[in-house]
Image: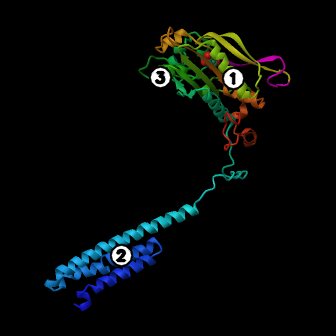
Amino acid sequence: MTDSMAAGGDLAALQAETEAQLAAAADMRAWDAVRVGVLGRSGSLTGLLKGLGQVPAEQRKDRGAALNRLKGALEAAIEARRVVLEEAALDARLRAERLDVTLPPRPFPPGGPGDGGIHPISRTIEELTALFGAMGFAVAEGPDIEGDWYNFGALNIPDHHPARQDHDTFYVPAPPGGDGRRPVLRTHTSPVQIRTMIGQEPPIRVIVPGRTWRADHDATHSPMFHQVEGLVIDRDITLGHLKGCLIDFLRAFFGISDLPVRFRASYFPFTEPSMEVDIGWNRKTGELGKGGDWLEILGSGMVHPKVLANCGLDPRVWQGFAFGMGIERITMLKHGMADLRPFYEADVRWLRHYAADPLSPPSLAEGV
Ligand code: DAH
């Protein structure tokens, strides 16, 4: 053992050397090399600790204590350097990955990935959601394959109703063990009225956009199409609320602030009274809002007391209104489309022409 060792000079030297190496370590790799060189299995400090056994007995205690102090000091210095280096690395990354969120979006290259648009059906559903959302409506959904009771029975549609006949409705084979009634591909979104009234306490304000199915196919009918249902249930809902709500909606949706709207007495099994809603248009030019002709656009009415009772609601306490309309139909009218079939033909030229910009979702502030 040298004099310098006895005085602990080698330890001071190791500490100074290690601190210099740490200061010089510019990244985590260099830092790790220093750490292993000191504390690793054949590191310098580890070597000194292993050599403690050879130190004369009378010096061993002091030497051991000095080595432990050094170990503590070096571990602290190594840890401190790690923190500094990791912070610096994070800073560098944050600087390198900085995004200017105020930059305008780059236009998608035509034909390249991302050259997409929102399908007009989806766009109309987004618009409906924005407009009715602003009036306090939530969006509800239900299954495409529906039980007979939800699609017909609970809605007060009797067994002999023509809508139940095979030529209108797609039936699914009855499952074994059931009541023998065949499930249907839902013929309208109205069964979600039933599911909503059974599933949640009033007050209720929902719209239900979704797929519907009927055996029908021509320029304005498709076996699969879309409807949006509306349902409002509360203690004091009147026909006035129905009219105000639908007039506001139709004027906002078609962007015509003085769009003429007419309510015409009609019949639906699930509403009483029932009304068909017409908007003013010009039959010859197809222009909406003027021309003195009327175009039927949706069905509506006050929810029938039997329907409320079928859902466990007391009609003496709760009442409300409902409406339903075809999404393809209002989309075609809004954009002047003559034929419904291209909605489902995936013709890229048609889609490019009618698709909406995915980067500008509908909003009340900017119009729909
Ligand atoms: N379910 C009807 C249909 O498919 C549309 C409808 C009419 C829905 C009146 C309603 C309503 O909620 O009140 O033809």
User: Is 366 drawn above or below residue 46 in the view shown?
Assistant: above
Return the disc, 3 or 2, that comes first in the chain's sequence.
2
Task: Give the structural element (helix, strand or loop) at label 3.
Answer: loop
Q: Is residue 25 magenta?
A: no
Return the disc, 3 or 1, that comes first in the chain's sequence.
3
Return the disc, 1 or 2, that comes first in the chain's sequence.
2
Of residues 139 and 186, the one drawn nearer to the viewer in this rendering: 139
Q: Residue at left 64%, top 13%?
A: 240
- Residue position for label 2: 36
Q: Position of residue 110 (x, y in %)?
A: 73, 51
- Residue position for label 1: 248
In front: label 3 or label 1: 1
Q: Among all residues in the image, which is located at the extreme left?
A: 57
- Residue position for label 3: 200
Q: Position of residue 228 (x, y in %)?
A: 62, 25
| Disc ID at residue 127 | none
Callout 1: CB less than 8 Å from ligand 1: no
Task: Give the structural element (helix, strand or loop) at label 1.
Answer: helix
Q: Position of residue 227 (x, y in %)?
A: 63, 25
**Residue type pointed to by label 1:** Asp
User: Is 157 drawn above or below residue 360 in the view shown?
Assistant: above
Callout 3: CB less than 8 Å from ligand 1: no
